[in-house]
Image: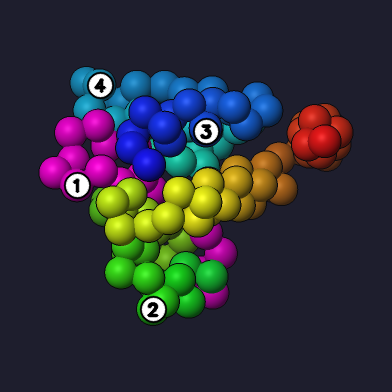
Amino acid sequence: MNIEDVRTFTLSLHEAVTEELFAGHWISFRIGGKWFLLMQLDAPEPRVAVKMLPEMAAELRERYDGVRPAYHMNKRHWSDLYLNLLDEDFVRQCIRESFWLVASKLPKGVRERLAGSEK
């Protein structure tokens, strides 16, 4: 999976929007105004940062070389996924889980609308 594949998949999630940050070197993906994925476009190794439950982040970092504490983020809640070291299905699942983790904190009406779109 490459950066463009990640971008295409992430934007396919209902109501996900993107925004360029830091002079176009980073892209954020948001739901309800909250970040759930960050992508550095000029990183030496392609990677994305996703939000995770702290327990899950710790477990996955022990299990996979391609899951590491996120660069310049709260390392308890954010993990970098190194795309060249991880299976595409695993990366997609982590992105989905990040999306729903962030969406779960949004107002009830937004959560219900998003849940209705997941069919």
Marks 2/1: CA–CA distance: 20 Å
| Residue 70 visible in the shown view | no
Q: Is residue 55 above or below residue 67?
A: below
Marks 3/2: CA–CA distance: 25 Å
For disc 4, the marked residue is 24
Q: Nearer the viewer, residue 107 or 94?
A: 94
Marks 3/4: CA–CA distance: 18 Å
Residue at position x 39%, y 78% in the image: 62
Numbered badge on residue 106: none
For disc 3, the marked residue is 10
For disc 1, the marked residue is 45
> Looking at the image, is mark 2 or mark 1 earlier in the sequence?
1
Amino acid type, mark 3: Thr
Marks 4/2: CA–CA distance: 32 Å
For disc 2, the marked residue is 62
Label 3: few (<14), some (14–19) or many (≥20) C-alpha neighbours in 10 Å: many
Is residue 114 shown left or right of residue 54?
right
Residue at position x 22%, y 28% in the image: 25
Residue 39 x, y percent position in the rendering:
34, 37
Label 1: few (<14), some (14–19) or many (≥20) C-alpha neighbours in 10 Å: few
> Looking at the image, is mark 1 or mark 4 earlier in the sequence?
4
- CB under 8 Å between callouts 4 and 2? no
Dot 1 lies on which element? loop
In magenta stretch: residue 54: yes
> Looking at the image, is mark 3 or mark 4 earlier in the sequence?
3
From the image, state whether disc 4 or disc 2 is nearer to you: 2
Dot 4 lies on which element? loop
Residue at position x 18%, y 40% in the image: 43
